[in-house]
Image (spheres, rainbow, N blue to C red):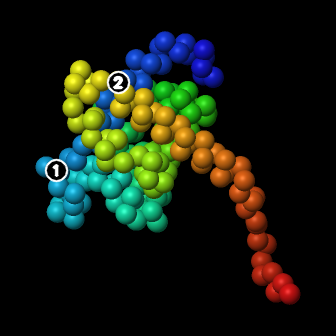
Amino acid sequence: MTSTGLPLRRCLPAALLAALILAGCAAPQDGGTQNGARAGGNEGLRSVLQDVRNHPENRAASEVYCLLSITQGDSDFPYQLFFAGLFSVDREDGTRAFCAAMVEAVIAGELTEADLAPFDRPSSVRGKEPLGTLLRKLMVAHLRLETQEAAAPPPTTSTGPQPPQS
């Protein structure tokens, strides 16, 4: 059983389905160009990931694009619940955790274009190894983000001007 109460055997087919659907999100939706938004087309998730790979300062915007790609799709697949179980987070945080992990893995150089390329082929051709690779890299990135979050000092609250420290 997973932390959400779903048997592991039920999660594996869901993982395969999620990877297939995400592969569709990852494919450029602008005829294959890397500059879809600049060319007036709809930029795909893969282009956004390439952008954040080159410009890590765009992390937040890339996470938002990922969230919108998943939540505004017309799939009946329960992404939020699946990702919540995968990353052991609350249900409402599942998709956010997935997108943060994907962006983190790309920025860290762990999730590359070569890792995503197999999802352009049917699963019968590519096999199951790319899915396992993808999920492992996302789990490592998620754990790294959790560790960084736990180690970060608590945010300070300011109630007004503070005296200079000497």
> Which secondary structure lies at badge 2?
loop
Looking at the image, tell me whether mark 2 or mark 1 is earlier in sequence order. Answer: 1
Pinpoint residue 135: horizontal percent, then vertical percent: 46, 33
Q: Position of residue 164 (x, y in %)?
A: 82, 86
**27 or 66, nearer to the observer:** 27
Mark 1: amino acid = Gly
Other residues around mark 1 within 10 Å, as few (<14) / some (14–19) / many (≥20)? few
Q: Using the numbered discs, state the Cα–Cα distance from disc 2 to disc 1 in whole angstroms.
A: 25 Å
Residue topped by disc 1: 32
Residue 23, percent from left and from top: 29, 36
Q: Quadrant of residue 159?
A: bottom right
Badge 2 local density, few (<14 within 10 Å), some, or many (20+)?
few
Q: In this view, which residue lies farthest toward the right?
A: 166
Q: Residue at x 86, y 87 (%)?
A: 166
Residue behind mark 2: 128
Horizontal side of residue 16 vs 100, given as left or right: left
Q: Nearer the viewer, mark 2 or mark 1?
A: 2
The residue at 30%/24% (across/down) is 127
